[in-house]
Amino acid sequence: MSRQRSTPFFDADLRDGVAAALEDCMQKTKNMDARAMQEAHWRLAADMGWLGAMVTEEQGGLELGRAFAADLCAEAGRALFCGPLLETAILLPALAAECSSLLPLLNGVVAGDVRLGLAEECSGQVLVQYADAATHIAVLNCSTDTLSVTFAPSTAFRCVMLQPLDPRSSVACAELIDPDVAEHIPLQREAADRVLHALYMAQAADLWGIAEAALLATVSYVVERRQFGRPIGQFQGVKHRLADIHTAVDAARLAIATTVDDAAGAHEAAIARILACDAALAASGAAIQYHGGLGFSWEADLHLYLKRALRLNASTGGTAALRSTVGERIIMRALEADAA
């Protein structure tokens, strides 16, 4: 099994530059608390121009397109980036492309002055990620063919901070207390498809970055850790499980590569997110187990990969619900094809 990094979606030099900058930042901030770490990571993203990856040149962005966005999100997942990078750099420009009233915010996105907290309803509550630093909050409400978004400055919400599963991502229970400043954005089928494509693709790439980082760390460890005079990677139980995970990680990468094509929509991106989530959960879980006592310690970063994968697994309705929706659509397409 190769321990080399996979082929980039866009450009190897650009991806490696992102990776090197993030690795250096991670080393400098590893002893900081979550809030200080988030500020350092965010300033890096703004200084490097990553926040403008999907913003047009007219708005001061780089307009590098989907493939670079996938590389950026993958490296963010690999490095456990602390901050709403996917929501602000990927989702917000996609929303602004469908709702012109949000376009003035893009200059602030590029400068790092705007941070988007993504919210969704869960068991009657509205839960917001990164609420402690968000300047704006978008509440998503998805149905079969439409998407409605409630968008407002964070000051229009009353937020009560909760204990997060992922220690690098704050979470709050939010209540809209100033509905007059909120904008309600109904998106019909095609517009909803474009916005959800951006969101699912970003989440899929982030999850894939987690999966590959956890897998490579595990492969490196099992060829060094020895039991009964042999590296544990030579035992069939370990070898076969890691081979299966490698296959899952590679399948997710190929699915994400499909989503960066201009013809791809939310359906393809949802499939990529499902596959990437499965791979991330499997790889991070195996990493903890095969690192033994070290893997189960708080000092190791392995639990952070698992917790981030679990957080993304539960986001935007959850992967199980998304899997059901995608499955139903595949069945409907097959029935329509047979009827034709």
Image (spheres, rainbow, N blue to C red):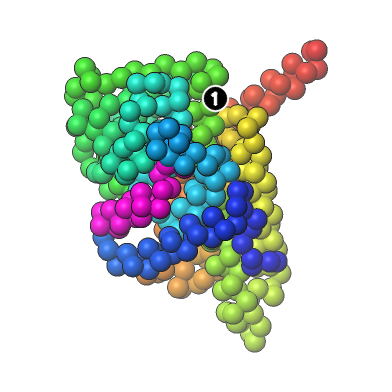
In the rendered structure, the answer to whether residue 17 lies left or right of residue 250 reads left
> Which residue is the extreme one toward the front?
58
Quarter occupied by residue 160: top left
In the rendered structure, the answer to whether residue 190 lies left or right of residue 316 reads right
**SS at mark 1 in the image:** helix
Q: Foreground residue, 143 or 103?
A: 103
Percent from the top left, x then y, of residue 289?
53, 66
Residue 13 highlighted magenta (yes or no): no
Residue at 69% across, 54% down = 247
> Which residue is the extreme one toward the bottom?
229
Q: Foreground residue, 102 or 84?
A: 102
Residue at 80% across, 17% down = 338
Residue at 63% across, 84% down = 228
Q: Give the number of callouts.
A: 1
Residue 51 highlighted magenta (yes or no): yes
Q: Say above or below: 139 vs 211.
A: above
Quarter occupied by residue 323: top right
In the rendered structure, the answer to whether residue 330 lies left or right of residue 198 reads right
Quadrant of the drawing holding the C terminus: top right
The majority secondary structure of the magenta stretch comes to helix
Percent from the top left, x then y, of residue 271?
62, 36
Percent from the top left, x then y, of residue 43?
32, 53
Which residues are drawn in magenta? 35-53
* Residue that label 1 marks: 193
Q: Say above or below: 337 vs 248.
A: above
Residue at 54% across, 39% down = 65
Q: Residues within 10 Å of mark 1 (few under 14, many from 20)?
A: many
Quarter occupied by residue 161: top left
Q: Is residue 286 visible?
A: no
Percent from the top left, x then y, of residue 40?
30, 57
Residue type at the position of mark 1: Asp
